[in-house]
Image: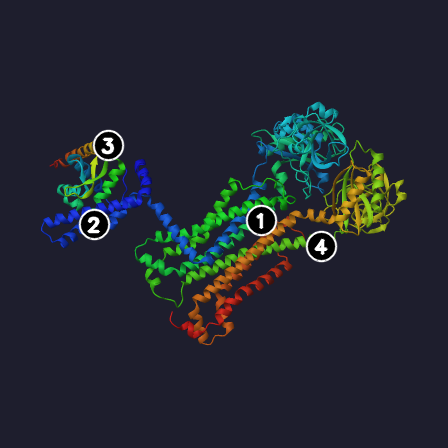
Amino acid sequence: MARPEEKSEVLQGTLDMMILKTLHALGSLHGFGIARRIEQLSEDVLSLNEGTVYTSLLRLQQQGWIRSEWGSSENNRRARFYSITAKGEKQLLRETENWQRISAVIGRVLALERQS
Amino acid sequence: MTMRAFFDRLRSLFTRNASRNETREEFETHLDFLAQHFERQGMSPSQARIAALRQFGNTTLHQQQLTDMRSFPALSNLARDLRFAARRLRKSPGFTITAILTLALGIGASTAIFSIVDGVLLKPLAYRNSGQLVVVWERVRALEKIAPYVGANPRHEELWRNQANDFSDLAVLQTGAVGVSLNNADHPRFVGQVSGQPSLLETLDIQPALGRNFLAQEAEQKSPNTAIISWNLWQSLFHGDRNAIGKTILLGNVSNTIIGILPKDFYFPKPNELTFLPHAADLPAIDVITPLPSRFSNLSWDGDYGDYIVLGRLKPGATIEHAQAQLDTFSKEVLRRMPPGGMEPGSLSTYIQPMKEVIVGKSTRSLWLLFAAVLSVLLIACVNLANAQLARAIASERESAVRSALGASAWSLLQTSLAEVSLLSIVGGAIGIALACLAVRAVPAYTHLALARTESLAVNPRVIAFSLLITLGSTVLFGLLPSLRMLRIRPQQALQNNARSVGSLSGTKLRHWLIGLQIFACSTLLLVSGLFTRSLIKLLTSDKGFSSQHIVIAEVDLGYAAFPSSKRLAFENAVLDHLRSLPGVDAAALVNAPLLNGESNIDPVGQAQGPWFLANYRRISSGYFNVLGQRIVEGRDFDDRDRTANNILISETTAKTVFPYQGALGRQLKHDGKLYTIIGIVSDAHNTSLRANPVNMVYIGSWENPPSGNFFLVRGSQDTTLLTDAVRKAIWSYDPTVTIAHVTSLDSRIHEVLSSERLETTILSAFGASALLLALLGIYGTLSYSVTTRRQEIGVRIALGATRSNVCRVMLQQLLTPLVAGLLLGWLTSLAIGRAVASLLYGAAPGDLTVTLFFLALFFLASAAATIFPCRQAATINPTEALRAD
């Protein structure tokens, strides 16, 4: 998974995965909606720089994991809606497995008792 | 970046504006929603808006990041830099045009010269695996004074062919020329001819395009006479008729059957190129090959050196050293077969030389010299541009300082400067290559006498690669230096309006030492070209020992078959009489060898008993010395009574050599077993070469053995062009089937002989002049600029009482050291170069006083011209104006 390095890679990766998960769970959303859901999930990532979600969205689009189309929102404003693709679902699965494996290992490491 | 992302970026390039608008709309929508979100939380509309903007982040930054992801930022930055650079260059048209022209001329000239170097020296010969082709010479101690190595004896070559195993093929050949005609009615045309053994085409690895090669039997029997002709000759004589095979042509009035046509791209060096005594001559291209017998049992083992050339192809993997060592072991066998008392052991050895070196070796030194010269001119030009660019950089220091203060990285400052320089180089380089292509097409007309292999010059990929390399090099040279200044910009200093003395001290010093570098290159070039000019002038004006004005030479070949000895004598007598009777002709005579063609017809000469020496023999008619204006020092010229006597004339050198203690007149000389009486001693002349000292000359009457190659010398009072036509008509009116090789004036022959000297001198002088001009422009530019930047300082000086000369001294002071250093180094370098190319010079030693003084005078005159205006400008600065606000 190649990504441009500008900010912390971990942070970008986290944001990308969170967006994929959000779209997987909640279906088609526009940028504002995605930002609100992510805010609920973790405040620190997005506070003071909500616009970065669009950078992630473009990157995910370029990878082919999400697609976008114009539609109208609840109050009939024209907005662009994003939804996950089949490729995106596969990627999400792969990333989830990865995370779970890593966290299991870390969990085991952290569970090591002090030898007395 | 994945492939998919790459293509997405590519596609996005076309939808840039639309994407930007869409994104803007998206951001607006997002901000509105966010503002509403905060309003619901209780903020006022304006507070909500501010909070939304704060939460969203910098819209411009986000927009830019998205744009960057949808394009190729590096490329668009480059495009922007180039556009910006173009705009800046348009604003200073003077600099731009000068820079582009200078680069175009410098790169164009360098490319043109390199294409000559490439086409002549570097390109392999037009044969398969041409690196294996060699010429086998022999070193004969007895002939060392004539040449360090000579053409091999064919009987020795037979031995080599049978026993040496480093060669896959060997062939003996002779080059020359012959008159070709279809029938006896046409005037024969003069073409180059190679007589070679059947193995010649195999050695060169060439198959005839039509027909076949010679068979061994055909070469032995010499009947029927056969010939292979070139593609061009086939086209012009037979118009490409395929039935030409089997037809006959007349070679020297002898009928020959055509058995083969050579391929279209056939190339063989001319007689004056494939030889051990290279000389300049206007010879026709090789168009005919005739067979030489494979056996030379009628030749002696000791002698006949220099008459034939042995060409060989080494086996793959064989080295020249090994082959030479092997052939030298056969020398013992050869010496054994010689008549007793012939040669001592060790006086015969071989020298194997690669074929390409034989053809172009003599031009190597001069071509590399010309190459170095043109690169020096390019260097000087680049330094000029570097100085100019440096000045511009200093002038725009404030702009760069502002950009730096605003956050531009050093690299991006460098980028703009490099963009400008690259743009200039690309345009200048492109024009330069185009100019070179044009020049290369015109070059062969000027160089075909001075250089071999110039018929096929082209701007090939290797030349283009070189051109790109020097364009890059020039860019680095004139662009990098000023650009590096960008990296050391200190915004605060530069922003201070410090007009009192603009430009750091180190910058000025750098510019002055660059001028010093230019002066060094310029003076080296001028001094070397001065040496060549003096050398050429000496060659042209030194006393040749004979007069060349108003003399026409006609070379006439009488074929052996059509003109046996008796017919030759009648022909020569009749033509001489006819020529002498032409209106306007003062004298006419005959000789059997061309003038200024090197030594030939060399045979031993000596007293009846005693040591023998080598001399050049010439068969002449009476009146020969009269035509050439050579003085008869003692005795008399030939006249009619000598036809029945064995009389001979010798030159002063021969007299001194053979008769060192007594007078030679009246004494006897032995030649070819006969004794001759010396009836006259003629003054020495440069008749074999303008450069070498006069050699031993011996003159025998032509009636004794009328030659087949005749050179009629005619001196007349009319214009030589009219005389040329008259002579040709006179000869053909007597017999229209003889081959007239050419009719030219002796003056143009001398012109021809000096063709390589003239080429070198012309080109070096042209480069020297350009270098001087460029260096002076550099000095002028630097001084002018100094005046502008030091206005206030000079104003102060004048206000304090400085005189005009004081001001001038101040201006020139900083330049003086680099200038003197440049001149001195240049002089020393010219000494070194002069020594390295001493073989190309004549009568002009390195460090020649006349040349040096002339150069110094020229240089100071020119510098004075260059410095006068800036100095005057400086001296007339109004102090009050200069000291006023900056």
Q: Residue at x 53, y 58 (%)?
A: B775
User: Few, some or many C-alpha atoms within 10 Å of disc 3 (few <14, some 14-19, many ≥20)?
Assistant: few
Q: Residue at x 81, y 52 (%)?
A: B631
Q: Amino acid at mark 2?
A: Gly
Q: Quadrant of residue B348?
A: top right
Residue B272 position within the rendered picture, expressed as x and y whole percent measured from the top left:
68, 40
Q: Nearer the viewer, residue A25 or B314?
A: A25
Mark identifier at residue B57: 2
Q: Are marks 4 and 3 in contact (CB under 8 Å)?
A: no
Q: Amino acid at mark 3?
A: Lys
Residue matched to label 1? B370
Q: Nearer the viewer, residue B69 or B222?
A: B69
Instruction: Name the element at disc 3.
Output: helix
- Position of residue B489 relative to residue B348, above or below, is below
**Can marks 4 and 3 be said to lie on one chain?**
no
Q: Please state the chain letter of the residue tagged with numbered disc 2 in the rendered image.
A: B
The N terminus of chain B lies in quadrant: top left
Residue matched to label 3? A87
Residue matched to label 4? B541
Q: Nearer the viewer, mark 2 or mark 4?
A: 2
**Can marks 1 and 3 be said to lie on one chain?**
no
Q: Amino acid at mark 1?
A: Leu
Residue sticking out furthest to the left? B42
Q: Nearer the viewer, mark 1 or mark 3?
A: 3
Residue B84 position within the rendered picture, expressed as x and y whole percent measured from the top left:
38, 53
**Can marks 2 and 4 be said to lie on one chain?**
yes
Whether residue B113 appears in this view of the structure is no
Instruction: Name the element at disc 2.
Output: loop
Q: Nearer the viewer, mark 2 or mark 1?
A: 2
Estimate the spatial distance between the alpha carbons at disc 1 and disc 3, rounded to whole Å: 67 Å
Q: Please state the chain letter of the residue tagged with numbered disc 1 in the rendered image.
A: B
Estimate the spatial distance between the alpha carbons at disc 2 and disc 1, rounded to whole Å: 66 Å
